[in-house]
């Protein structure tokens, strides 16, 4: 009996690298999954981890438990790479407990918005906490250092010769307790895993959701808010039963909307909650409070605002309180008694109370039972799993039914298509698999990434995404699906396998003909990969599309593409469709990026001379001439040059490309100026002159006359423009 037991243990536990232990799957399935856990967490929660493993296997995943006293991310990654080479194919991993965090540098082009100066700001602030280090095995990194304070944090640099686009090999998720919450973290993790097991056993169709948009989001454009319904009707077809199962809430609906949201979050039947808001690691920004009403209301509002401004100036030591009050009294013609009630302490107390009522904070969530099985945070920093307290973590570690969230570890672009292919969740696709499709450097699954809803019709979609991902015939058949997001996925998979680069005419046809808003948006996004004539035409048509999100993204692409043929449409929409606030705002920026004669020139020919935008355009043209002269003069202050060059990342002026290239090639320019200029050209990845840039940089490399740092940056930019 002892011999049999010993042999079974040999089969069960495989010695890993060092102290790493691997418990093999108990059952054989078509795909595999790995639980990565630290030794202490496994010791304290072993029964819960094994029950979770059993639930995963019952759900069709051959599941490994990999435990170790992890010293650094490279140790963890080495074990994942080994598992990825085994059969069955690995479709995902989850990190439970204290797994080292990789913070990535030199890869801001893989984020949606994060552009902090890595040379000027400390490593903890200017690096991106990202599990793409673990789940995108195509990428290669150089280790920099371990953080001296947060010793579980490790800094890595994306190599210049690495692939420069995200393409995760498999999906991942984090189950990390936010220790600021207090209590026993191991007990909390075990309790969470029991909840994950419970939810796996429950048949649950996705038929109830709420979408909320907070203040200041997407320029507070009502068209942007209203049009989300067009897509979600396609995404969640079962949810349109009554007024309670498909809700669209807006910060304007109540003075303090957070309390209404608490009610929604605690509804037992809730499946999905979508938050579109501004955020911080410890806060969801929900609303601004009540708008002033009546004359007295506006007077009180003005007084309160001025008091707050004065308090801020005093705290900044801009003068004595008396001097600052005297300035405001004169500036705004205030009466002699205006500041008689002024009190720093009272203002601070009032501001603190108001702040609590206008946002959801960690203390609110500590006692709240959240019930949506999946919560998406389309917000900055809510998914900052590297912090001791983070919003997304509080949503899964409570007594409610929330089992998985998606959030961002850094700031995120407001105009990102966050609900791209979210309808796959209705088809029973795992949340982690969906997140893999829309991967960003900062976007993470917090909780069980294998969670899925019951598909409303039997299908093998999730399996095909892993096993048949390279089979074009399979995806050609899926194009005939009656469901929008299945068609979108099919288009994506066909483009992923388009080695001959021949799909763009077909994508343009889909964009022109599909009745599905989501499919047209997917076609536009996929066309951006080709950045060719078909892409330009799709942008032009997209500016007039019925779906606001398509118009908005077409406006973004118009500026980033810069093709002069887009000028007429850009100006036409800008002048004649002011009701699309966010689109209008983006087009104003796009107009300044187009070549001057085609962009500003067309606008100036059509608009009255009194236009504020016209005045801004004239100023912008004049400023650009001066700026270019300063950049090209090697005697200019280096710090000023670099500051202006970094601005190019957000505002790629296509007419300036020749000047930018000359700066890189000019040996009299400072090395750091040339490095920054080479990096900035990598942001022209949608430009109609992209191939021209890449060819010019390749020619520079052939001449081999650049310093090492400049050469490396040029190589990286070439890879980014491929």
Image (tube, rainbow, N blue to C red):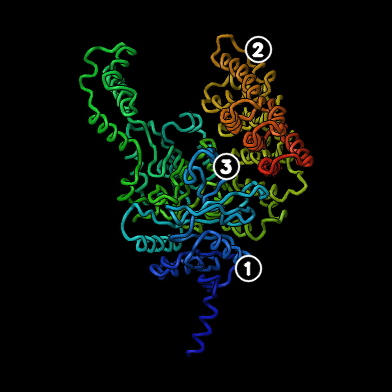
Look at mark 1 in the image and give the residue it sits on. 86
Quarter assignment of residue 151: bottom left
Q: Residue at x 35, y 63 (%)?
A: 187
Which residue does the numbered mark 2 point to in the structure image?
605
Residue 429: image x %, image y %?
55, 55
- Which residue is rendered at x = 33% and y = 44% of the image? 263
Residue displayed at 72% across by 28% down: 658
Q: Is 234 left, or right, of 251 in this rendering? A: right
Which callout, 3 or 2, points at the residue further toward the start of the chain? 3
**Vertical comparison of 328 with 412: above or below:** above
* Foreground label between 1 and 3: 3
Closer to the camera, 613 or 294? 613
Mark 3 vs mark 2: give the one in front.
Answer: 3
Q: Position of residue 581 (x, y in %)?
A: 51, 25
Q: Secondary structure at mark 2?
A: helix
Q: Decide: few, some or many residues near mark 1? Use Cα within 10 Å; few <14, some 14-19, many ≥20.
A: few
* Circle 3 SS class: helix
Mark 2 surroundings: few (<14), some (14-19) or many (≥20) residues within 10 A: few
Q: Is 262 on the left-hand or right-hand side of 704?
A: left
> Secondary structure beneath disc 1?
loop
Whole-percent x, y for residue 395 in the image: 39, 50
Q: Earlier in the sequence, mark 1 or mark 2?
A: 1
**Circles 3 and 2: CB distance less than 8 Å?**
no
Q: Please tell me the numbered disc located at residue 376.
A: none
Residue at the disc numbered 3: 108
Question: x%, y% of residue 278?
Answer: 43, 37
């Amino acid at each position: 009996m002892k011999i049999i037991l010993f042999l079974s243990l040999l089969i069960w536990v495989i010695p890993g690298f060092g102290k790493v232990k691997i418990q093999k799957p108990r059952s054989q399935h078509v795909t595999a999954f790995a639980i990565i856990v630290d030794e202490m967490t496994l010791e304290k929660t072993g029964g819960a981890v094994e029950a979770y493993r059993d639930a995963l296997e019952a759900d069709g995943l051959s599941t490994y438990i990999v435990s170790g006293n992890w010293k650094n991310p490279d140790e963890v990654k080495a074990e994942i790479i080994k598992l990825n080479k085994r059969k069955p194919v690995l479709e995902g991993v989850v990190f439970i407990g204290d797994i080292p965090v990789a913070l990535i540098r030199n890869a801001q082009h893989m984020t949606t918005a994060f552009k902090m100066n890595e040379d000027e700001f400390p490593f903890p602030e200017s690096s991106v906490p990202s599990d793409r280090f673990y789940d995108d095995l195509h990428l290669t990194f150089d280790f920099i250092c371990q953080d001296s304070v947060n010793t579980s944090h490790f800094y890595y640099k994306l190599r210049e010769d690495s692939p420069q686009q995200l393409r995760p090999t498999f999906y991942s998720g984090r189950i990390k307790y936010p220790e600021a919450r207090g209590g026993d973290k191991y007990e909390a993790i075990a309790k969470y895993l029991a909840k994950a097991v419970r939810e796996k056993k429950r048949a649950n169709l996705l038929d109830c959701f709420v979408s909320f948009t907070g203040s200041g989001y997407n320029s507070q454009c009502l068209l942007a808010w209203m049009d989300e319904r067009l897509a979600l009707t396609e995404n969640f077809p079962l949810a349109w039963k009554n007024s309670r199962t498909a809700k669209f809430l807006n910060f304007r609906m109540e003075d303090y909307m957070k309390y209404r949201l608490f009610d929604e979050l605690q509804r037992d039947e809730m499946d999905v909650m979508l938050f579109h808001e501004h955020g911080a690691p410890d806060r969801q920004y929900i609303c601004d409070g009540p708008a002033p009403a009546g004359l007295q209301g506006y007077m009180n509002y003005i007084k309160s605002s001025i008091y707050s401004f004065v308090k801020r100036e005093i705290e900044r030591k801009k003068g004595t309180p008396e001097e600052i009050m005297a300035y405001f009294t004169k500036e705004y013609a205030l009466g002699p008694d205006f500041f008689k009630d002024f009190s720093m302490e009272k203002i601070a107390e009032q501001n603190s109370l108001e702040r609590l009522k206008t946002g959801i904070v960690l203390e609110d969530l500590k006692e709240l039972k959240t019930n949506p099985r999946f919560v998406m945070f389309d917000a900055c920093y809510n998914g900052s799993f590297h912090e001791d307290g983070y919003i997304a973590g509080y949503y899964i570690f409570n007594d409610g039914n929330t089992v998985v969230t998606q959030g961002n570890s850094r700031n995120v672009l407001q105009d990102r298509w966050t609900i791209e292919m979210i309808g796959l969740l209705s088809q029973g696709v795992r949340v982690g698999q969906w997140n893999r499709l829309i991967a960003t450097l900062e976007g993470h699954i917090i909780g069980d990434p294998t969670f899925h809803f019951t598909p409303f019709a039997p299908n093998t979609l999730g399996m095909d995404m892993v096993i048949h991902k390279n089979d074009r015939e399979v995806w050609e058949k899926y194009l005939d699906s009656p469901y929008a997001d299945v068609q979108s996925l099919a288009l994506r998979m066909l483009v992923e396998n388009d080695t001959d680069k021949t799909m763009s005419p077909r994508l343009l046809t889909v964009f022109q003909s599909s009745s599905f808003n989501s499919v047209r948006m997917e076609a536009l996004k996929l066309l951006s990969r080709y950045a060719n004539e078909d892409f330009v035409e799709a942008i032009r048509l997209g500016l007039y599309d019925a779906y606001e999100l398509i118009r908005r993204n077409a406006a973004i692409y118009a500026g980033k593409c810069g093709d002069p043929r887009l000028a007429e449409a850009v100006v036409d929409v800008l002048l004649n469709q002011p009701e699309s606030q966010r689109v209008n705002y983006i087009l104003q920026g796009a107009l300044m990026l187009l070549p001057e004669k085609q962009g500003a020139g067309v606008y100036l020919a059509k608009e009255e001379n009194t236009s504020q935008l016209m005045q801004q355009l004239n100023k912008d043209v004049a400023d650009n001439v001066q700026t270019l002269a300063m950049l090209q003069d090697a005697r200019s202050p280096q710090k000023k040059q670099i500051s202006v060059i970094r601005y190019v990342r957000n505002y790629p002026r296509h007419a300036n490309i020749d000047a930018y290239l000359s700066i890189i090639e000019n040996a009299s320019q400072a090395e750091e100026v040339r490095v920054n200029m080479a990096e900035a050209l990598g942001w022209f990845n949608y430009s109609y002159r992209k191939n021209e840039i890449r060819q010019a940089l390749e020619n520079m490399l052939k001449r081999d006359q650049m310093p090492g740092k400049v050469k490396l940056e040029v190589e990286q930019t070439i890879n980014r423009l491929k």
